[in-house]
Image (cartoon, grey):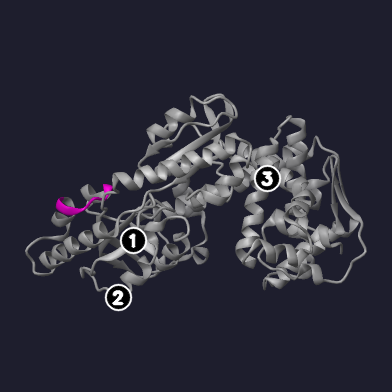
Amino acid sequence: MKRNHILTMMLLLALPAWAQNRQPQVVDKVVAVVGKNIILQSDIENQYLQYRLNGETAGTAQSMRCEIMRDMLFQKLMLNQAEMDSITVTDEQVDAELDRKIQYFVDHLGSQEKLEQYFNKTIVEIKDEVRRAAKDNLLQEQVRAKIMERVMVTPSEVKKFYHDLPQDSIPMVEEQYEIVQIVKRPPVSIDEKLQVKDRLYQIRKRILEGESSFSTMAVLYSEDPGSAKKGGELGLTGKGVWASEFESTAFNLRDGEISDVIETEFGFHIIQLIERRENMVNCRHILLTAKVPVEALEKAQSELDSVARLIRDGKMAFEEACKKFSDDDAKSNGGFITNAATGSKRLGVREMQEMEDYFPEYKNLAFVISRLGIDEVSDPVPMTTNEKKDAFRLVMVKKKIGAHKANLKDDYNLIQGWATNAKMQQAIMGWVKEKAKKAYIRIDENFADCDFYSEWKMQ
């Protein structure tokens, strides 16, 4: 198997293993055609070997290859539809996607030099080889978004979905907690803010003078982990989602224009407009945050120590102390920490751990509550808010819910997510059935036993 073909697949799919290029060569051939797009035998085998390396053992070898083929046919059909719908992506979008993929592997190997050594190629050469794959990935994302844009479930659909589940297949829900907190967020000094603004102005100057692209500078410097790996890109977004200052600036930019430095509750930004589509815009940004002085953090810790003593001595209820002393927006609601995935007040340990990389508020939360009993208040513990600000907090477990079989009363939001995913799958299947009738599709007879074969060969 060719080394650069494996590299293309790895960067396209963002897989974690690194041993694929040491697999023996296979005889290659075209096993499927969708419009102008082909699927090679090596594409299938490459993915199959990767699953095996990752410990995937579900099903027979042939059933796994069938699932891989089904996924790749869907990807190629989306590319075919993107061409029919004249969907395009810009060079800057492709560059941002490449930067994100490269950064993913740099993070796993440890450095850019190690990545280059592993493949015996420069970063520029690697990007050149996988540029087409990155572009295809972006086109597929746009087509998928169009398929999903009208998918939503009503409460009655959620109930029907649940009641239609066989009783013996209703999943168990892990042990969960309802957690409250009191947060002290010390203010940032004016001098620190001025220094951060100056840094961002220097970054903006380097971009305007052509020293580097906006997306590259976002990967290198932006403190927004969600968008930095994508070159700062936020995706098509309508009004009412971003902070008001950010939204006002973004919607008033011209294509390609870079904003002045603006401030929001999250920090300081510069914004570049990628495209405008009706009432939505796609832009990228670079975020820098001002750091809280050590002295202010020490003061916050001391203040929370005093609050904890009031609660432990019975002189003030946690909820009352939360309303009086907390700087958190949730203080009017008793200080409950919300599950970002479901919107409920309940959090499982695994959920907290999985969300740590995306929501700093969850960092070390599972460890803190593991040492607390019900209604026991913690000592002040350091935290980073979701706005990337250093702070301290007191934490208390209000309720512990044992592991149980999912039900509508306790787990509505979770079941709603399952119902939505099921409806998304239905939307995809309906879309495939419609579009496959209009596209030229040819599949190798070796895959005729796959259970999807007749669906894709019906035209």
Q: Image point 65% across, 43% down: which residue? A: 141
The amino acid on which the numbered mark 2 sits, given as a three-letter code, is Arg
Q: Distance between the residues labelled 1 and 3?
A: 44 Å
Q: Would residue 29 be found to the left or right of residue 408 on screen?
A: right
| CB atoms of marks 3 and 2 within 8 Å | no
Q: Which of marks 2 and 1 is nearer the N terminus?
A: 2
Tag shown at residue 371: 2
Q: Can residue 231 be seen in this view?
A: no
On screen, residue 156 above or below 167: above
The amino acid on which the numbered mark 1 sits, given as a three-letter code, is Met
Q: Would residue 76 be found to the left or right of residue 110 on screen?
A: right
Tag shown at residue 429: 3
Magenta residues, start to end: 324-329
| CB atoms of marks 1 and 3 within 8 Å | no
Q: Quadrant of the N terminus?
A: bottom right
Q: How many labels does the image show?
A: 3
Question: Residue 68: image x %, image y %?
Answer: 75, 58
Element at label 1: strand
Question: Residue 449: image x %, image y %?
Answer: 83, 59
- Mark 1 vs mark 3: give the one in front: 1
The amino acid on which the numbered mark 3 sits, given as a three-letter code, is Met
Q: Which of marks 1 and 3 is nearer the N terminus?
A: 1
Residue carrying label 1 = 383
Q: Which of marks 3 and 2 is nearer the N terminus?
A: 2
Q: Distance between the residues labelled 2 and 1?
A: 17 Å
Relative to the observer, which residue lies in front, 350 or 391?
391
On screen, residue 413 above or below 399: above
Element at label 2: loop
Q: Is residue 390 visible?
A: yes
